[in-house]
Amino acid sequence: MNEKQQEYLDKYLNTLTDAERSSIPLVLADYFCADEFNANECARLVNTGIKRASCSLKAAYDVANEPFPEVGALTVVLNWAQEPVCIIRLTEVSTCPFNEVTREFAEAEGEGDGTYEWWREAHIEFFTQYASEIGAEFTETSELVLERFEKVYPL
């Protein structure tokens, strides 16, 4: 986390009690997606409250030997230029095969035209390419890590 991101985070942390701060399992600074347009668009969608969920390929955690996200974790949402846009708190983490993701979850991701159909096509394309880049395979039954979050700063 750079100095500007840390200062932004500190403004939020200073609004919390000691107990609230000590209950935060992890703090990250990151952007959504893998390109400038989508990173900036997702930051905007999160900041306006349209995007309230995200998903990732479970195989990516396995390949990198990384732990799953934890409920209560904070993320300083960045734009592509690494500037803080808002802060979110993870409220729910679950796994689900791609082909069992619900319409409600897909719509909570808030991207594209907001429909399940758009979500499905965009994610098939993204996960197929991403899986091949990390040496994994993506199919309709590949496990996803589903995350739900709430914007906590600024309110």
Image: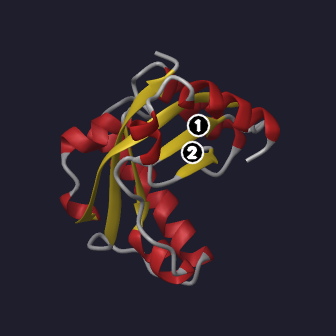
For mark 1, give the secondary structure. strand
Most foreground residue, 11 or 46: 11
The label nearer to you, 2 versus 1, is 1
Q: Is residue 43 left or right of residue 5?
A: left
Residue 77: numbered disc: 1
When asked about the image quadrant of residue 50, the answer is top left
Q: Residue furthest top?
A: 155
Q: Amino acid at mark 2?
A: Phe
Query: In this figure, which residue is indicated by the disc labeled 2?
Result: 32
Position of 17 relative to 96 (above/below): above
Marks 2 and 1 in Cβ contact (< 8 Å): yes
Q: Amino acid at mark 1?
A: Val
Q: Position of residue 83 (x, y in %)?
A: 74, 32
Number of disc labels: 2
Color style of the picture: secondary structure
Q: Position of residue 27 (x, y in %)?
A: 55, 49
